[in-house]
């Protein structure tokens, strides 16, 4: 389980391990690259938790559930 701050790190780790740039994942999720950057660089109250979950799900195929976030639920 992880916190919101940890979720930002998990999103970045998942993207990097998949070999995707911020621009590539942004295109896949139809968001600006700057939003991906903000999602990966946690700031308290930044409002990017949903995008972090989307990044992880898009890259790994795993669902993320909170409030102490668990990564690893298969969505298939």
Image (cartoon, grey):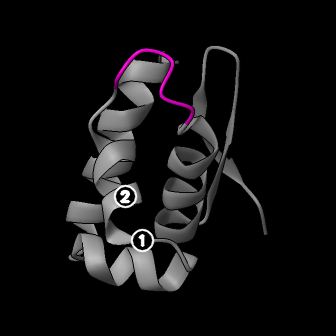
Foreground residue among 46 and 28? 46
Q: Which residue position holds label 1?
A: 32
Residue 59 in percent (x, y) is at 46, 68
Q: Nearer the viewer, mark 2 or mark 1?
A: 1
Q: Is residue 17 left or right of residue 35?
A: left
Q: Residue at 39% across / 44% down in the picture?
A: 39
Give the quarter of the figure containing the C terminus. bottom right
Q: Which residues are magenta?
A: 43-47
Residue 62 in which image quadrant = bottom right
- Secondary structure at numbered mark 2: helix
Relative to 47, does residue 5 appear above or below in the rendering?
Answer: above
Residue 7 in which image quadrant = top left
Q: Residue at 37% across / 35% down in the picture?
A: 8
Task: Using the image, tell me which numbered label, if any, was put on residue 57.
Answer: none
Task: Give the main secondary structure of the magenta stretch.
Answer: loop
- Secondary structure at numbered mark 1: loop
**Structural distance between the alpha carbons of marks 2 and 1:** 7 Å
| Total number of numbered discs in the rendering | 2
Residue 6 in percent (x, y) is at 37, 24
Q: Which residue position holds label 2?
A: 36
Q: Are marks 2 and 1 in contact (CB under 8 Å)?
A: yes
Foreground residue among 45 and 21? 45
Magenta region includes residue 58:
no
């Amino acid at each position: 389980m992880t916190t919101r701050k940890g979720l930002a790190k998990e999103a970045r780790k998942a993207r990097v391990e998949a070999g995707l740039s911020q621009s590539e994942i942004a295109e896949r999720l139809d968001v600006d690259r700057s939003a991906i950057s903000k999602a990966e660089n946690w700031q308290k109250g930044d409002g990017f938790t949903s995008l972090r979950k989307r990044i992880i799900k898009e890259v790994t195929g795993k669902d993320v559930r909170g409030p102490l976030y668990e990564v690893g639920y298969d969505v298939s």
